Amino acid sequence: MNFRKLCKNIPSRIFLLVVFMTLGTVVSVAQEIKEDYVKFGGALRYNIYDKSWTDDKTDPQFAWDTWRLNVDARTSGVDLSFEYRFYPGDDTHFLHHGYLGYAFNENLYMKLGVTQVPFGIGKYASHCWWFQMPYYIGLEDDYDAGITFEYKGIKNLILDVAYFRQAEPQGSPNFSARYSYDITSSDDASIKELNQFNIRAAYQLTKNVELGVSGQVGQNYNTVLEEAESSTAFAGHVVANFGKFNFKGEYIRYDYGAKDNLGNTLDKVQMGAYSYDYNVAAKADVYVAGLAYSMDVEFGPISNVQAYVDYSIIDKRKAGFKSSQHLIPGFLITAGSIYTYVDWAFGKNNAWLGAWTDGLAEGSPDADWENRFNVNIGYYF
C-alpha cells in the first residue's frame, strides 16, 4: 500500500465517508433537540498491594493510585467529553480523552479529538482492574487523536470507522506520559505513530451474543530516515451473556513494522505510557479469554459482587522470543459509587509483573511466574 499517496487523499476520503454515511441515513427520523448542560465529575482511587519479585521490606503498601477530573457538556447539539488524570505515585499527569461529539441523526455519531480507538472488544476486553495483555501493547482501551464515526443504520450491526493522525498528546513529565500505550522514540529508533485507519463491525447475533471483527492499518514513521513502515492489526471477538455469566474472547494478530535510525527492520519496538517505556515484540498473535459471574447481594452498602478470571497470552512470531502470559483471578465489589477490585495477578515474561524491559519482547526461557496481590478502591462522583 502506498501510504504517502493515501495520506494526501485523507481530507477527500473523510469527506466522502461522511457524505456516504449521512446519505445512508437521510430517511431517519430527525433527532430530538436536547437541552444544554454542564456536568462535573471525577474519581479518587487507592491501591493496597504486595509484590513477589522484590525484597522491599515495606510491602504490603497502601498507595494513592489516581485522581481525575471529568467534564461532560452539551451546547447547541454539540457534545463535549473531557477527562484529565493525575498519578501522584508516578509523578505524572495526562489527558485521558477529550473530544467534541455530534449526532447527524439517530444512526450516525461523530467524535473529533482524543477518542477511544475502535478495535476489538469495546469498551474493555477485561473484567479485572489490570486489563488484559492487549492493553499493554496498545490494542485495548487505546486513545489517539483523530475523528471517529459510529453508524447504527443496519439492523443488529454497529459499524465504527476512524482516522487518527497521531497518538494522544504528551503529558508530564516526558513523552511517554500518557494513558494508553503507543510506540515511542528510543535512542536508536526515532519513531512515532501516524495516519492510522480503523474499522470495526460488531454484530448482535442474538440478544446475548455479539460477534465482531476489527482492522487497523497505519504508519510507524522514522523522523531520522523520513520514512514510514506499515503497521497493521486485525482482531475477531465474541462477547456472550448467559444468565449471570459473561464471557469475553478475542484473537489478535499484529505487525508493528518499524525501522531503526540506520534502516534496520526492528524485531521489537519501544512502547510507553504512564511516563514509563519498555520493549514489545514487533509481531505476535494474542489470545484473550475472560469469564465472570455476577451476584446481587444485600450486605450493608454492597449491592453486587462479580467474580472473574481473565487470561491472555502473547505468542511472539520471532524465533527465540518467549511468550508472555497474564492470569488474573479476582472479584469486583460494588457499593453505590464505590468500586473495589480485589485481584491476585500472575504473570510470566510480563512487564508489569516482574519482567520490565524485555519481558514483552524476547522474554526469558527461565522466567518464573511472578504475582502481585492488589486491592484497588475507587470512589466515582
Image: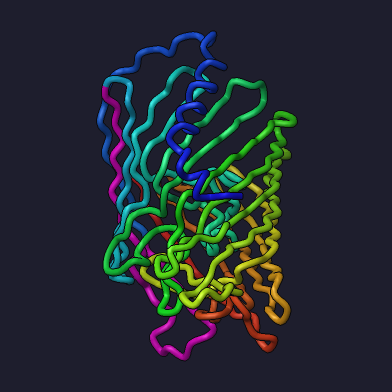
- Magenta stretch encompasses residue 18: no
Residue 173 in the image: above or below residue 148: below
Is any atom of residue 352 visible in this view? no
Residue 253 in the image: x percent, y percent?
68, 57
Residue at 57% x, 49% y: name it.
Answer: 2
Q: Residue at x 50, y 60 (%)?
A: 228
Q: Quadrant of residue 211?
A: top right
Rendered location of residue 214, percent (x, y): 64, 44
Of 240 and 313, the residue lying toward us: 313
Please provide the residue range marked out in magenta: 46-75
Q: Is residue 48 magenta?
A: yes
> Is residue 195 shown above or below 347?
above
Quadrant into which the C terminus falls: top left
Image quarter for residue 287? bottom right
Q: Quadrant of residue 308?
A: bottom right
Residue 201: x %, y % from top left:
64, 36
In the rendered view, tell whether residue 332 sits above or below residue 242.
below
Is residue 189 shown left or right of residue 120? Answer: left
> In the figure, 9 relative to 194: above or below?
above
Q: Image check: 304 left or right of 241?
A: left
The residue drawn where x is 66% and y is 71% is 325
Residue under the image location 26 percent in, 24 percent down: 75
Residue 334 visible in the shown view: yes
Position of residue 227 measured from the top left corner of the image (x, y, whole percent):
48, 62
What secondary structure is the magenta-colored segment mainly? strand
Along the line of sight, which residue is nearer the eye, 166 or 130? 166
Q: Nearer the viewer, residue 303 or 85?
A: 85
